[in-house]
Amino acid sequence: MQFIISFLVVMLFLMLGEWVSSLTHTYIPSVFMTAVLFVLGYWTFLPKDVVATASFGTNFSTICVGLLLVHLGTLMSLKKLLEQWRAVCIALLGVCGTLILTLTIGTLIFDWHTVVAAIPPLTGGLVSALLMTDGLKAQGIQTLVALPVSMFIFHSLFGYPLISWLLKKEGGRLVNEYQKQPVKQTVPTGLDNDSNENNLFKKMPAKYQTSAFILVKVALIAALSSGLSIALKTYLHIDLNSNVICLIFGVLAHQVGFLESDVLTKAGVYNWLMYGLLAYIFAQLSLTTPHQMGTIIVQIIVLIMLGLLGMFIASSLLAKPFKMTWQMAYACSLTSLCGFPADYVITSEVSHEVANNKEEEAYLMENMMPKMLVGGFATVSVASIIIASVFLKLL
């Protein structure tokens, strides 16, 4: 009974988030609304292990990440992925803007340890937050132990609506651009690519191309990606995040015809895996309490505002040289506040809401999604870990 009730609550919160997003035309993204519901739930009636009890634990989330990133690779071309160097530069330089403003103005307002403990989770994900928490414990700075995880939680709440608004502005511009094209650009959508001539399994009888067969192929690519990441770190001392390799290998596997386009949707498990991963991310909201938040809320809000301002200044100055609108450039930088899968979910929701038809939606996804995903990997998966490692030595 407890397991099914926990599952019911988790799915109810995800459903309400989607409904609110639809009712507000994505001005309130589903991930933001669901995060708020989980925070309020954990602070009132929800048990801390509700997500794990609903079967969305650590092992399941690890599987979800690998499979979903391989899947996303099947939605991109290698050319599009390689073209995103501008998004990587913008995202990383946006983080630099945050570092400059928080380390200068921030240290004039708060003490050094507070600023140093808050910056890594402000510019990245949960891993950097946990690294800083462990560092504070090791240094015996107990008064700030709750700060890194609290910063990780609340910067997302600020970032989700802002990213959604920026992408809506960019999406509106892209729709106008698409409509003005004398000959409409044809952008493959969904499973339209499945009939391509590169499909290595086109001669296999359809009765053998089951969902299990598709999942075996996706899991194989994810396993190879993880194995390569471990091998590079063990033998060559190159720490290349397995998530990045999963995305690249997904693109390559699709290019050579090993994987179909939109592969997990064809297998019928895409939504299930995405919901499971989102639930696990929201489970981290259980790590703080209202009492902890009451003691550090001022520091969190002020440093987030400084961080957002630093990103905005850097993105605005660099947008034109990197051939982006300031909205798209700022959104790329802000991926450091959410990362995968939130960047994917928000971009998908906005593309669906702003577009008038499937062709326009595909055009928006083609132009915005690669930038957001690559920007998120550059900040959350790479830069934030490096920043946390450096800042640990500054405590």
Image: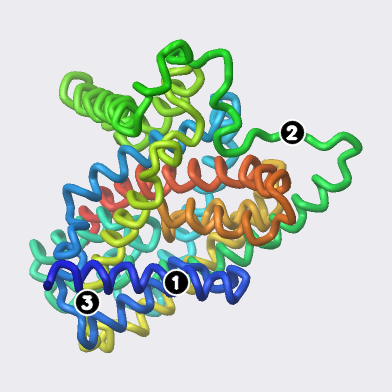
* Residue lying at the far front of the rendered structure: 207
* Residue position marked by numbered label 3 in the rendering: 288
| Amino acid at circle 1 | Gly
- Which residue is at 24% across, 66% downward? 283
> Is residue 273 visible to the viewer in this orientation of the structure?
yes
Q: CB under 8 Å between callouts 2 and 1?
A: no
**Crowdedness near tag 2: few (<14), some (14–19) or many (≥20) residues, C-alpha within 10 Å:** few
- Of residue 5 and residue 282, the one placed in the foreground of this image is 5
Q: Secondary structure at mark 2?
A: loop
Mark before the other along the chain sequence, 3 or 1 = 1
- Of residue 287 and residue 202, the one placed in the foreground of this image is 202
Q: Position of residue 185 (x, y in %)?
A: 78, 35
Find the distance from the CA under tag 2 to the CA under tag 1: 32 Å
* Residue position marked by numbered label 2 in the rendering: 186
**Crowdedness near tag 1: few (<14), some (14–19) or many (≥20) residues, C-alpha within 10 Å:** many
Mark before the other along the chain sequence, 2 or 1 = 1
Mark before the other along the chain sequence, 2 or 3 = 2
- Of residue 236 and residue 250, the one placed in the foreground of this image is 250
- Of residue 263 and residue 132, the one placed in the foreground of this image is 263
Counting every numbered tag in the picture gives 3
Find the distance from the CA under tag 2 to the CA under tag 3: 48 Å
Quarter-of-image position of residue 32: bottom left
Q: Position of residue 16 (x, y in %)?
A: 43, 74
| Amino acid at circle 3 | Thr
Q: Secondary structure at mark 1?
A: helix
- Which residue is at 41% across, 14% downward? 204
Q: Position of residue 282 (x, y in %)?
A: 30, 66
- Which residue is at 41% across, 16% downward? 205
Find the distance from the CA under tag 3 to the CA under tag 1: 21 Å
* In this picture, residue 132 sits left or right of residue 177: left
Up-down relation of residue 12 to residue 61 (above or below): below
